[in-house]
Image (cartoon, rainbow, N blue to C red):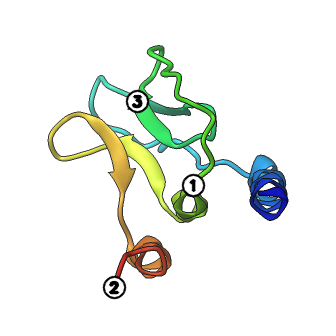
Amino acid sequence: MLKVVFATVVLLASCAGSQPTTSPESTSETSCEVSGCNSEICSEKGKKMISPCVVLPQHVCLKKTKCEVQDTGKCGWTPNKEYRECIKRFMIK
């Protein structure tokens, strides 16, 4: 149990200094921002979301992508090559 807590604290500390950024070049009226306890939620600007403070290892992959307006007109994380490579490490085989 102590090892799990320690690993969680280490992971939190490594994530605390850097957060994903929003896209400044959004062309629609909607703009997005990162929220949630672990910066894991991409939502419409001004509508900050809260989440349980549960640290999941795959949250580190969000630093490799952007929170921005998607083709649907809604906010979301835009996958890219670096994100996909990162998230593959956490998929169940």
Q: At which x and y percent is residue 66?
A: 47, 53
| Pair 1/3: label in front | 1
Residue neighbourhood size for the residue with mark 3, other residues' Cα within 10 Å, grouped as few (<14), some (14–19), many (≥20): many
Q: Residue 2 carries which label?
A: none
Mark 2 or 3: the one toward you:
2
Question: Pointer 1 and pointer 3: residues touching (CB < 8 Å)?
Answer: no
Give the residue displayed 60% in from the left and 41% down from the top.
54
Q: Give the residue pinned by disc 3.
A: 43
Instruction: Mark 1: give few (<14), some (14-19) or many (20+) Cα within 10 Å.
Output: few
Report which residue position mark 1 lands on: 56
Are the two marked residues, 2 and 1, in contact with CB atoms closer than 8 angstroms?
no
Q: Say which residue label 2 marks.
A: 93
Q: Earlier in the sequence, mark 2 or mark 1?
A: 1
Three-letter amino acid code of the residue under disc 2:
Lys
Left or right, 31 with respect to 29, comes to right
Q: Compared to 66, does 52 lie above or below?
A: above
